[in-house]
Image (cartoon, grey):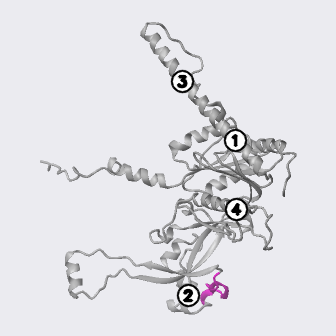
């Protein structure tokens, strides 16, 4: 007779149960997620479409890689789904009628929005063709890249300069929030495999205050190799063989040699090595603390180790080893010029503009007009809510009296028509601003 099964997992909580649901939700809320969108569908052209794909690959893993846009999609469609999906940033690529490529970086749900003009860009395939030894695929994009920013805050900037101090702080905060924060004490170094560099171009002249706000973006893969060890010995290391290509990973044939020392000590033995192989093409050398593997001991072995009867020592002390760090560019490259900053999500009051400067009187008039628009919007929403509630009551009363309440008119009046988004580029908005400010002074 078969033996009855003894239940051993009766009181074990489920991994996806309500106990861990709270922790999972909190961890997901802390991780920033982005959507790289091609505004206008295929009308932007093949180059910009490929640039969007390259930027999605750079923003992995917390981005929508397989997002497909349609020509009929509005910006409201993406903002509506940003909340349920936990999307925190929107990167909108578009192309104007004059041929300029533009990028908008917006924070959901209420902004602000940074408007950039993409002056120059290079695709990933162009970067790979320029490299002698391009980096292949692999596991590099399974972890977010390390963000490095340079010259984002100028020492001489203040609130009265062309690029005020608050604008520099806002831009720094927005770019820092694109990726999750890194804890150097907790995160393993092996998980940092990519780096995204953002460098702000600063003028060589100390008194140059009219320079535009220009950022250069680069994307690299981080590769490391052990230093101080000849290449002949490194070819026999299993850790190095796993990171090599299939062609070069084979162990050399030592059948014609009398001893393995002939291969390890003689650099010209069997023609395996050359003088150039000992030179490492690296950018820097660092010391990395690599922890050794601990052996799991039972109770008796622990007692022997504590009593000093065991001659073997199982310590977790870290061993520092020198590694050569090399950066291999992955692409894409972009040169971004900041044009303007809006207060809302692709709408709202213009906080800063690169070409248009307004006086204090004009700014106060604009503030009054925005306050008036906000009041009218609130009144309109209140009126629409009252109308919807009144129609519901009338319909319920008609159903109670036995009448057929066929109310098919204006069921979606609660939608504010002023909040309807357009998928066109913001050049139309800029054109309206230029028409309104044609008599104003323009500063380059």
User: Closer to the N terminus: mark 1 or mark 4?
Assistant: 4
Could you tell me which residue is drawn at 20 percent across and 53 percent down?
Answer: 8
Residue designated by label 2: 228
Magenta part of the chain: 269-280
Specify the label residue 53 is tagged with.
Answer: none
User: Closer to the N terminus: mark 3 or mark 4?
Assistant: 4
Residue designated by label 3: 386
Tell me the crowding category of disc 2: few under 14, some 14 to 19, or many 20 or more residues within 10 angstroms, Cα based: few
User: Closer to the N terminus: mark 1 or mark 2?
Assistant: 2
Residue 328 point in image, percent of width and height: 65, 70
Mark nearest the camera among 4 and 2 is 4
Residue 350 point in image, percent of width and height: 71, 48
Is residue 205 shown left or right of residue 70? Answer: right
Mark nearest the camera among 3 and 1 is 1
Is residue 11 shown left or right of residue 107? Answer: left
Mark nearest the camera among 3 and 4 is 4
């Amino acid at each position: 007779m078969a033996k009855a099964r003894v239940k051993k997992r009766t009181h074990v909580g489920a991994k996806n149960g309500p106990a861990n649901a709270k922790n999972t939700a909190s961890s997901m809320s802390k991780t920033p997620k982005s959507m790289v969108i091609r505004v206008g569908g295929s009308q932007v052209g093949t180059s910009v479409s490929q640039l969007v794909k390259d930027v999605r690959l750079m923003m992995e893993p917390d981005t929508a890689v397989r997002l497909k846009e349609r020509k009929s999609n509005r910006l409201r469609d993406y903002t509506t789904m940003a909340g349920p999906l936990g999307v925190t940033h929107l990167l909108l690529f578009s192309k104007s009628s004059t041929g300029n490529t533009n990028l908008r970086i917006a924070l959901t749900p209420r902004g602000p929005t940074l408007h950039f003009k993409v002056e120059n860009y290079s695709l990933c395939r162009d970067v790979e063709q320029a490299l002698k030894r391009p980096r292949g695929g692999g596991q590099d994009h399974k972890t977010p890249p390390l963000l490095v920013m340079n010259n984002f805050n100028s020492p001489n900037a203040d609130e009265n300069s062309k690029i005020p101090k608050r604008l520099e702080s806002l831009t720094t905060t927005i770019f820092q929030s694109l990726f999750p924060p890194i804890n150097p004490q907790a995160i393993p170094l092996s998980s940092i495999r990519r780096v995204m560099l953002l460098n702000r171009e600063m003028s060589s002249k100390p008194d140059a205050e009219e320079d535009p706000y220009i950022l250069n973006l680069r994307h690299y893969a981080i590769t490391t190799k052990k230093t101080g060890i000849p290449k002949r010995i490194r070819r026999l290391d299993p850790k190095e063989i796993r990171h090599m290509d299939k062609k070069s990973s084979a162990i050399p044939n030592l059948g014609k040699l009398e001893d393995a020392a002939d291969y390890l000590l003689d650099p010209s033995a069997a023609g395996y090595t050359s003088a150039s192989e000992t030179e490492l093409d690296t950018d820097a050398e660092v010391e990395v603390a690599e922890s050794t593997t601990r052996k799991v001991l039972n109770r008796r072995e622990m007692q022997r180790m504590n009593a000093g009867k065991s001659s073997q020592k199982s310590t977790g002390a870290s061993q520092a080893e020198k590694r050569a760090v090399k950066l291999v560019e992955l692409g894409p490259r972009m040169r971004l010029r900041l044009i303007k900053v809006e207060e809302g999500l692709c709408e709202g009051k213009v906080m800063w503009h690169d070409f248009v400067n307004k006086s204090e009187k004009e700014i106060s008039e604009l503030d009054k007009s925005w306050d008036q628009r906000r009041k009218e919007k609130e009144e309109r929403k209140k009126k629409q809510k009252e109308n919807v509630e009144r129609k519901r009551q009338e319909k319920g009363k008609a159903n109670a009296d036995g009448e057929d309440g066929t109310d098919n008119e204006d069921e979606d009046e609660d939608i504010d028509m002023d909040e309807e988004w357009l998928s066109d580029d913001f050049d139309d908005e800029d054109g309206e601003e230029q028409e309104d400010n044609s008599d104003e002074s323009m500063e380059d």
